Amino acid sequence: MSNYIIKNGLVIDPVKQTQSKADILIKDGKIADIAAEINCSLPLIDAANCIVTPGFVELHAHFREPGFEGKETLDTGCQSALQGGYTTVCTMPNTNPAIDKEYLVRYQKLRGREINKIKLEVIGAVSKGLAGQEMAELGKMYSAGAVAFSDDGMPVMNSGLMRNALVYSSQFAVPIVVHQEDHALSGNGVMHEGPTATKLGLAGIPALAEEVMIARDIELIKNCSAKLHVAHVSTAGSVALIREAKSKGLAITCEVTPHHLTLTDSLLAERLYDTNLKMSPPLRTANDVEACINGLLDGTIDAIATDHAPHRFDEKDVEFNYAPNGITGLETAFSALYTALVKTNRIDLLTLVKKLSSDPARVFNLPGGTLNIGSWADIAVIDLNRGFKVLPEMLATKGKNTPWLYQKHYGKVCCVLVNGEIKFVEESFNGAKENL
């Protein structure tokens, strides 16, 4: 196990809610000390002019393996996570076969250990084959290491199945993660229902399609002690429903994506039929974006998650109606949010780091996301002043389907440690190269 000292950085501690110049001592892979000045003869990571944060924790990513390795593999997904400052990632089960059995959970966790880049956590399916008809083997998957259950990509339309899954999962105290979309309301919609959709001649998805399902599941958890986690909240009405449910003490948490915090459906009128703007739930209105930002600030929204969803170029290079939903997000999450929200004083840096690290770890009861003494040294070093263009060739993910392609961002991840080992150093960062 490597020992290091990180010096000269601005340490952002989301648990203690502090940011200060400090050194971090790492021994045997764990944080041994944090102090204004630490002098010892260990290998140095010079974080001058950078911030030092806990490694980010991702609750919602699609790494596509097994079955769709042309889009992404666990290896390329893990590398993508590292380059975005993530040290823990929870993968969704919509693979082929779907992760709906104990041995498949074990397979993914074993592959994560073999790849040995980040900490890979597995979300098991709620229903067999993600078909929404029969409950999967939740207990066995939990025993194999599943940290949550979800049919993400598909809503659990069957209320009886959803109720049974909530009741059954409550004995393990892990959440059911829900993609909230009433198919009867969303129909064949491909973007947010509103003036832009009408102008472009595209079928719309109303906000109500999301909100009705959230309202249903809030009613279901009133009668059991289950944990409900709402994925990728996108509407003002959804935020209001969750805020009210939390005020009543219900066990509900939620996440929001970087794109639902920064982009609106009107962008499709500027970038006509750009399939890198097609996702589910769709981009919403400026009012919805504002509600999501406010929900993040007042604690209604617990975490930021990317919903990293890589696709092949040929899959996205089609007419808008036929393109698959989803964009990549792990490598651009911090920089997109820092550039759009922190630099414009919409949110503060400490809140951003907290919603990317300690808060998502809390939601799924995961280790990580902290700089506590004695915790594993999962750490990111980030140069906030470093500007860069998001170029396809700089992305480790196989999927280049990002709405931020060719845009300038600030906040470059320079170095990432997992369990105290340097796993990523950006090529122009000289502060740790001698340690490689």
Image (cartoon, grey):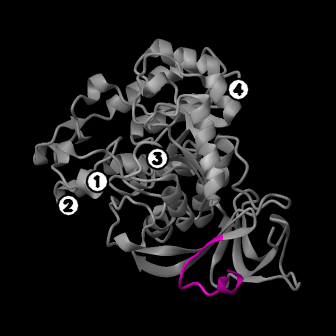
Whole-number angstrom distance, CA of label 2 to CA of label 1: 9 Å
Residue labelled with disc 3: 62
Say few, some or many: other residues with alpha carbon within 10 Å of mark 3 (under 14 / 14 to 19 / 20 or more). many
Which residue was labeled with disc 2? Answer: 271
Q: Between label 1 and label 4, give the one nearer the viewer.
A: 4
| CB-based contact (under 8 Å), mark 2 and mark 1 | yes
Q: 198 left or right of 365?
A: left
Q: Closer to the camera: disc 4 or disc 3?
A: 3
Tag count: 4
Assess whether residue 319 is covered by the magenta stretch.
no
Name the kind of residue labelled 1 in the image: Leu
Q: What is the quadrant of residue 147 in the picture?
A: top right
Location of residue 300 in the rendering, given as x and y in whole percent from the top left corner: 56, 41
Q: Earlier in the sequence, mark 1 or mark 4?
A: 4
Using the image, tell me which numbered label, if any, was put on residue 277.
1
Q: Earlier in the sequence, mark 3 or mark 1?
A: 3
